Every structure is written in C-alpha cells, then in structure tokens.
Image (cartoon, grey):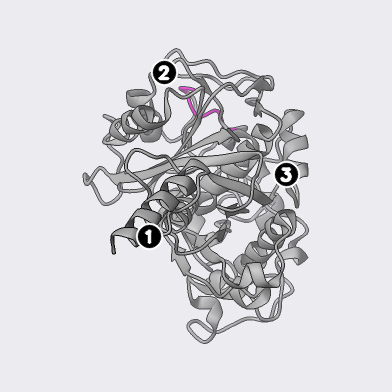
C-alpha cells in the first residue's frame, strides 16, 4: 500500500509539471493544469475556416448586413442588421439538421488540424454547446431541404449535433451537450477541461453551434427588446441598443499529451441567482470569478468581454471591468452567435495568440472604464481572459496563454 501510494504521488507530481492529469484523476493542490489547444475550426459570415476569420479580422472586415437580404424585404426584421453563413447549401442535408451540418463542418476542421487518427478519436471526449439547439430547419422551413414534422425526427432533439459528430467522426468517449444560453460554448470548453484534468480522457473535441436567424426566434428577441438597430455593433457606445443576431459554429481540439501553441489554464463559472432572465446592473458575481482567476493566473494582459451591445449588458460590464488590460471585442465583426459566441470568439482569439498577438477591434469601437480598445493587432504579453454570460446571470470565464 505504502509503496504504491508513494509511486502514485510521485507520478502525479511529475505529470502535473507537464500539465497532465494525475493518474488518480486529481491534480495536486495549487497546481494549474495547462491543457493544450491542438486544433481549431470556425464557420460564420466571415468564412468557412479559421484562416478566413483571421484574415478578415486582421483587415478590419465585417459581414454584417440587413436581414432582408436573407429573410426577404417583407420580413418584420428586414431592416435590422445580422450576419449569416453562405452558401446555404453548406448547411443542407437530407438527414442532419442545419445546426448539425455546421457542427460537423467545424468538428472536421479541428480534428484535421489536430492530426488525430481513428484510434485517438475513438476514446476522445465530445462536448457540444448550443443555445437554441436545432430550431433552424424544424421550427420553420429550410430552403432545399425536405420538411420534417414537429417531433417526428431526430432533428427536433437539442442533442442531435453531438450525436451527428459522434456517428460521423467515430467519437465514443464521454459525451455531453451543454445548453446554458449564450455561455454554452465557453461552458462546453470548461467542461472539457474539467474532464481532461480529472483523467476521464486524454483528448477532447469541443464544438459550439447556433443558427438563430429563424423568424420565430427573431420575433422572441425583438419582443424582448434585445435586437439592435445599428450596424456595425459598437457594444459600449451610448447609441447601441441591442445585439446583432448571427449564425456561427466553432470547434477546439484539446489534449493533455500533445503540445500546441496555446493552452487553457483556468475555467470557472458561477450564477448571480438574481433573475430568470435579467443580468444585475451591479455586475453580479462576475467580479469574484475575475478575482479568483487573478489569484491563480495573474493579472490579465487582455480581456474579451461578452459585450453584446444591450443596455443591461453594457451596464453590468462597466461594473466589473476595471483593469490595465486591453479590451478586444469580436461581435462587431461577426455579430452575436448566441450559444456559439464564447467558443467562436475563443477560436479567433487563439488563432491570433498562436502568432503571439491579439485581435484588433473594428475601427471606431469604444473601450470602457478607461480600458483601451486598440484598432490594430497588438502583442500578446500575458494571460487573456474570455468572459461569457447567459441570461439569468450565468457567468463563465476561461483563461488562455501562449504555451509556457
């Protein structure tokens, strides 16, 4: 017993030095696990892969346009700004829902970038984040796709994207779908890190997807006073009055045994427990998330806030954004991709961090609380904090670094 325990302790200490999960599924107290990012995937109005997003944002390009170009000029929302994936055939399939097709697209990108073979994929964990699930394609018609009756096919199940990826990519390890609203993508990434740190898997594929440009959903958002009327989105401007809805999907491949150019060093979330829908203007308990992360990871060099552009979100963020870090806002480029937003913005960030840089803000974007929002690409000089928030005060935070 004593000999085995001593060997296990020594093995755990050695594995922790390299950011690997311990043999017992636990890390020694005080050790921060460095889980490597080894593959990325992205799909949005800016393009079909990570490089197209990197190029567009590097050059200050945005694809936000009037929704009438997608929904028709007779739509209630025709004059409002939005952003969507083109061509639509990319999302069209006789069996899988449009959301599942988007999820498969980015999942295959990340797996290819990671270079994983069938045996490595088979034992990987799969975690998918989404907010509205498969609403697109069954709450309304989808051009070029045969219709499904409500509750008559798998397309009506929120977990279908995870099922589709598991089947098409041959992933049979731990399998989860997270549906925590606008923070779902970042929460999915956090759950993957927790599973890897606990030793439940050596690799994890994280995917997030949302296609919210469905008339019924847009009606719900509009009736709640959440949709923005200005474009491009400028989250901290006094004239900004809501968010710009957009389609998007993203994927991140994580590994504890392979080395990537970037790592996720910390994740945490909490709840304000204040209201089923609203966000406390005081900032709620996000400050405690940030303070705890600083104690473990150090002061942030940069922060990517949720920054949707709604009045209540801006008020909440002004309450807890007080740092010498720079602000980097990505929704002015891609819109608000709802449950995919946290992961898609992380993918874009990580692509820049792979070059040891930070993404620029769209020209004209404002900072907040005295924080600078640079319009040019800047060096990455320390940990980067990414925040996401779900309705009702669900707060999430991930911390990234270039590889130590």
Is 55 above or below relative to 364? below
Q: Gap between marks 3 and 1, in whole Å? A: 43 Å
Q: Earlier in the sequence, mark 3 or mark 1?
A: 1
Q: Is residue 230 visible?
A: no
Q: Is residue 232 visible?
A: yes
Residue reaching furthest left? 274
> At 39% across and 59% down in the image, what residue appears?
25
* Label 2 Cα crowd, 10 Å radius (few <14 / some 14-19 / many 20+): some
Q: Nearer the viewer, residue 284 or 235?
A: 284
The quadrant in which the C terminus is found is top right
Q: Position of residue 374 (x, y in %)?
A: 61, 18
Q: Which residues are magenta?
A: 233-238
Secondary structure mostly seen in magenta is: loop
* Label 1 Cα crowd, 10 Å radius (few <14 / some 14-19 / many 20+): few
Q: Earlier in the sequence, mark 3 or mark 2?
A: 3
Q: Which residue is mark 2?
A: 323
Q: Which residue is mark 3?
A: 46
Q: Nearer the viewer, residue 132 or 192?
A: 192
Q: Which residue is mark 1?
A: 24
Is residue 179 found left or right of 372 in the rendered image? left
Q: Gap between marks 1 and 2, in whole Å? A: 38 Å
> At 66% across and 39% down in the image, what residue appears?
261
Is 103 above or below relative to 231? below
Label 3 sits on a secondary structure element that is loop
Q: Nearer the viewer, residue 314 or 304?
A: 304
Label 1 sits on a secondary structure element that is loop
Query: Which-is-in-front pick, marks 1 and 2?
Result: 1
> At 48% across and 62% down in the image, what residue appears?
132
Query: Which-is-in-front pick, marks 3 and 2?
Result: 2
Is residue 277 found left or right of 206 in the rendered image? left
Query: Which-is-in-front pick, marks 3 and 1?
Result: 1
Is 64 above or below relative to 122? above
């Amino acid at each position: 017993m004593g000999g085995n325990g001593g060997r296990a302790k020594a093995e755990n200490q050695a594995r922790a030095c390299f950011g690997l999960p311990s043999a017992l599924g636990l890390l020694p107290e005080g050790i921060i696990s460095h889980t490597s990012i080894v593959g990325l995937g992205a799909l949005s109005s800016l393009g079909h892969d990570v490089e197209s997003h990197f190029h567009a944002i590097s050059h200050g390009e945005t694809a936000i346009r009037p929704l009438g170009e997608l929904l028709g000029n007779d739509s209630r929302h025709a004059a409002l700004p939005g952003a969507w994936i083109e061509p639509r055939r990319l999302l069209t399939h006789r069996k899988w829902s449009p959301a599942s097709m988007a999820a498969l697209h980015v999942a295959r990108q990340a797996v290819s970038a990671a270079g994983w073979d069938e045996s490595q994929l088979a034992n990987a964990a799969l975690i998918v984040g989404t907010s509205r699930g498969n609403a697109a394609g069954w709450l309304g018609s989808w051009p070029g796709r045969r219709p499904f009756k409500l509750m008559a096919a798998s397309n009506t199940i929120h977990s279908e994207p995870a099922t589709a990826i598991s089947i098409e990519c041959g992933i049979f390890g731990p399998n989860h779908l997270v549906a925590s609203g606008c923070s779902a993508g970042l929460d999915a990434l956090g759950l993957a890190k927790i599973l890897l740190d606990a030793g439940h898997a050596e690799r994890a594929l994280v995917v997030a997807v949302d296609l919210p440009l469905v008339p019924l959903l847009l009606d719900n958002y509009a009736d709640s006073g959440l949709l923005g009327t200005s474009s491009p989105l400028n989250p901290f401007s006094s004239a900004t009055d809501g968010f710009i809805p957009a389609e998007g999907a993203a994927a991140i491949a994580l590994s504890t045994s392979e080395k990537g150019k970037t790592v996720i060093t910390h994740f945490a979330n909490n709840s304000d427990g204040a209201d089923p829908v609203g966000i406390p203007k005081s900032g709620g308990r996000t400050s405690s998330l940030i303070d705890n992360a600083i104690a473990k990871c150090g002061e942030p060099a940069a922060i990517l806030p949720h920054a949707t552009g709604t009045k209540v979100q801006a008020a909440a963020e002004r309450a807890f954004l007080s740092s010498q870090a720079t602000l980097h806002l990505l929704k002015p480029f891609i819109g608000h991709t709802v449950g995919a937003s946290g992961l898609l913005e992380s993918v874009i960030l990580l692509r820049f961090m792979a070059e040891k840089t930070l993404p620029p803000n769209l020209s004209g974007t404002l900072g907040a609380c005295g924080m600078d929002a640079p319009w040019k690409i800047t060096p990455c000089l320390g940990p980067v904090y990414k925040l996401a928030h779900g309705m009702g005060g669900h707060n999430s935070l991930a911390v990234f670094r270039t590889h130590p």
